[in-house]
Amino acid sequence: MKILLLGSGGREHALAWKISQSSQLEKLYVAPGNAGTNSIAENIDLSVEDFEGIAQFMLDKKIEILVVGPENPLVNGIHDYFDSRPDLTQITVVGPKKEGAKLEGSKGFSKDFMKRHRIPTAKYGSFNYDTLDKGLAYLDSLPGPYVLKADGLAAGKGVIIESDLSKAKKALKKMLKGQFGSASSTVVIEEFLSGVELSVFIITDGVNYKILPEAKDYKRIGENDTGLNTGGMGAVSPVPFANREFMDKVENQVIIPTVKGLRKENIDYSGFIFFGLIAVKGDPYVIEYNCRLGDPETEVVLPRLKSDILELFDGLATNTLSERDVEIDPRSASTIMLVSGGYPEKYKSGVEIEIGAAVNSDLLFHAGTKEVNNKIVTNGGRVISVTAYGKNLETALKNSYDSIDNVSFDKMYFRKDIGKDVLKSPKKK
Ligand code: AMP
Ligand code: GLY
């Protein structure tokens, strides 16, 4: 099989790493990729939004499968574009069409979808500038803290949690006046849920689904979950509190109604669904859907997937997903994100990275790197995700942290407390 993978983060390096282990792989291209993907695949200088350029490249190289890493091209309709061109119908796109990608692209749509299909989620209301008064009254009716979400994609920054009512009201006005551009012309206000978050992933052809290993990520920049939100500072899998009983609830109350709901609404979906969940007193609630894999979750989820991922993609291509196996590695995996000093605010790029020879370089997933004059330099806030296995989470984390000793660059920062919280929770049954 020939594959083109879109994206340039740690998620894509982990996907490329997993895809390149398949005996069925003939050739893997990554667009635009990073210094990590370049060492195991061929990077192609194409933007993920250049649908026409991507299509032409795939036709020229006779590539059968397009794997879309990030959400933007999906929300902007890359799959629909491929469907609309008769000369591209032979190509399988891993990732949903626009309508399915709305699960992530519109918070209002996803909340209404959950309500229609009785999927547990926080109580909410959707408001625009014309219904501002109703929005303010809705805030009055809630106990707080107040959760305000820009309806559209806002690069992970569109959620504001405010404990003070009058500040929440001000925040609502500011959002509706265009704080996040058109993404916040509609705002979803939600009841605040208190619990522990985790991420669950499936791959689905819209009828059948396979559950991948679950993970927990760490979004805040500071230790003990303090400071600004980031794209993710580390992740662990499995999640100790997500025992059999909890995961059964996730499957029955969340996954099955979601896949059935998509079918009922004639949304034909093919690709990954990422359920951002919160466990409230042992019950799962959906915080958000994403129409793709998570980053850095993928850097622990795919290392724990023993099965050949191309078998799963082929299952989507040939409508045989139900016949494919998902075998999971019993070992634990953890990943620690090394970031540029100053991230998620201002930081420097182009800083040279030193990687010692002792590192098991297979599991150093590059997130924001590029090669310049045969040197690897930083190219983003999140730079390298250091993944390791262990017989349990403690060992995996120790191995990840030990590996970090072999990587350095000026102003490198990472959290030293990844996984500490879940180690305290009861062991998985
Ligand atoms: P989202 O972009 O919807 O995933 O929200 C970003 C983050 O805000 C989540 O990961 C949660 O930590 C927090 N959050 C979102 N919705 C709620 C809620 N209803 N209650 C409590 N925290 C929330
Ligand atoms: N780690 C969260 C995300 O990928 O959205």
Image: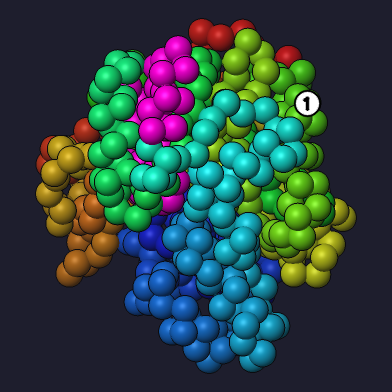
**Which residue lies at the image location 37% right of the left edge and 73% below the top edge?**
47
Residue 157 among those drawn in magenta: yes
Residue 392: % across, % down: 58, 21
Residue 398: % across, % down: 42, 23
Near mark 1 (Cα within 10 A), the count class, few <14, some 14-19 or many ≥20, is few
- Is residue 218 shown left or right of residue 424? left
- Specify the amino acid type for callout 1: Asp
Residue where numbered disc 1 is placed? 248
Taking 150 as reference, is 43 above or below it?
A: below
- Is residue 125 shown left or right of residue 245? left
Instruction: Depth check: give the residue in front, 357 or 296.
Output: 296
Which colouring convention does the figure follow? rainbow
Residue 350 visible in rendering: yes
Residue 222 visible in rendering: no
**Which residue lies at the image location 19% right of the left edge and 67% below the top edge?**
372
Residue 40: % across, % down: 46, 64
Residue 37: % across, % down: 41, 62
The picture quadrant where one finds residue 42 is bottom left
Instruction: Depth check: give the residue in front, 405 or 89.
Output: 89
Taking 255 as reference, is 105 above or below it?
A: below
- Residues drawn in magenta: 133-162
The picture quadrant where one finds residue 280 is top right
Residue 66 among those drawn in magenta: no
Instruction: Depth check: give the residue in front, 288 or 358.
Output: 288
Q: Quadrant of the N terminus?
A: bottom right
**Which residue lies at the image location 50% right of the left edge and 53% below the top edge?**
105
Instruction: Depth check: give the residue in front, 322 or 290.
Output: 290
**Which residue lies at the image location 52% right of the left edge and 63% below the top edge?**
74
Task: Look at the numbered disc 1 and give the secondary structure of its residue.
Answer: helix
